Image (cartoon, helix red, strand yellow):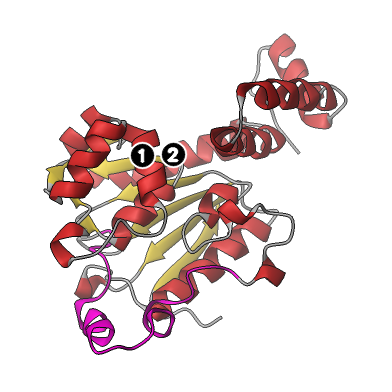
Amino acid sequence: MELKVVRYEVEDGVATVTLNRPERLNAWTNRMAAEFRWAMDAACGSPAVRAIVVTGAGRGFCPGADSEALEGLVEGRPYGAIFGPVAAPASERKEVRADFGHQFSFLLGMEKPVLAAVNGPVAGVGFVLMCFCDIRFAAAGAKITTSFARLGLPAEHGVAWLLPRLVGVGRAADLLLSSRVVLAEEAAEMGLINRVLPAGELFPAALDYARTLAAEVAPSSLRMIKAQLYGDLLGGLDASARQAVDLMHRSFGGPDFAEGVRALREKRRPQFP
């Protein structure tokens, strides 16, 4: 795909996916939806990539859907024609459960960790994207809002399921019902943001974190733990514990476990194939 509004770069085992409409603070469009999905699929399928960082170009992360495009919805144009399909075609889902087959929930079903580097304002569909990333770093003072209620919309794309699991029901209700703006610092106190950094340090810190995952953590463990993390939210404790034991026994005979044990005994960093 020819990328016009998303940048895709790979270095040191990390793919950086940058929303690239800085003149519009990276407002979401149909083109961006298609390019973003292509970039994430490329990262997921590349053996050179072990972790992914998602960020925005310029001053913003993503302030939501492009306001000009929203006018098209008011005029009756189909959502998919403006902002892309809300679900992947069944033929593209392969063995992934239906829960992870939607426009943003597919991020939870990816086998590689996804880190959001929130460099500026985030709202609406940008808020959804941020929440469906596994880990979230943000620039100090970054403004964050759900914005749905102020536009006469419901909580979009499954974020009403995810947000209470990130911050608790009460805080999720506050953010969704009021659409109030919170700064990155308050979002971190809620547990929505993992780490707040000065603006100039945000991307280097996010990249360093992702590089550490790529270099020092077994790729098989990243794959299994991420699947456990979100799969277990949809199941019961008995199934979770049984699956964990099964995966543990399978891992004993694998090359990643052997290298991890050797590195531990030799007091060095592991070098996973």
Gap between marks 1 and 2 measured at Cα = 5 Å
As for residue 120 lying within the magenta part, the answer is no
- Quarter of the image holding residue 161? top left
> In the image, is 11 to the left or to the right of 257?
left
Up the image or down, 117 lies above or below 61; here it is above
Q: Residue at x 23, y 58 (%)?
A: 123
SS at mark 1 in the image: helix
Q: Residue at x 50, y 54 (%)?
A: 105
Q: Looking at the image, can residue 34 be seen? A: yes
Q: Residue furthest right?
A: 253
Residue 208 marker: 2
Q: Which residue is more in the foreground, 110 or 267?
A: 110
User: Around disc 2, counting alpha carbons within 10 Å, would you say few (fewer than 14), some (14 to 19), or many (20 or more)?
Assistant: few
- Identify which amino acid the numbered label 1 is placed on: Ala
Residue 214 placed where, x, y %? 59, 40
Disc tally is 2
Q: Residue at x 49, y 41 (%)?
A: 210
SS at mark 2 in the image: helix
- Quarter of the image holding residue 192? top left
For the N terminus, give its image quadrant.
bottom right
Q: Residue at x 22, y 28 (%)?
A: 189
> Which region shows up in magenta?
61-88
> In the image, is 100 to the left or to the right of 155?
right
Residue 97 placed where, x, y %? 66, 52
The answer to the question of whether label 1 and label 2 lie on touching residues, with beta carbons closer than 8 A, is: yes
> In the image, is 187 to the left or to the right of 90?
left
Q: Which residue is more in the foreground, 203 or 251?
A: 251
As for residue 78 lying within the magenta part, the answer is yes
Residue at image mark 1? 205
Residue 211 placed where, x, y %? 51, 40
- Identify which amino acid the numbered label 2 is placed on: Asp
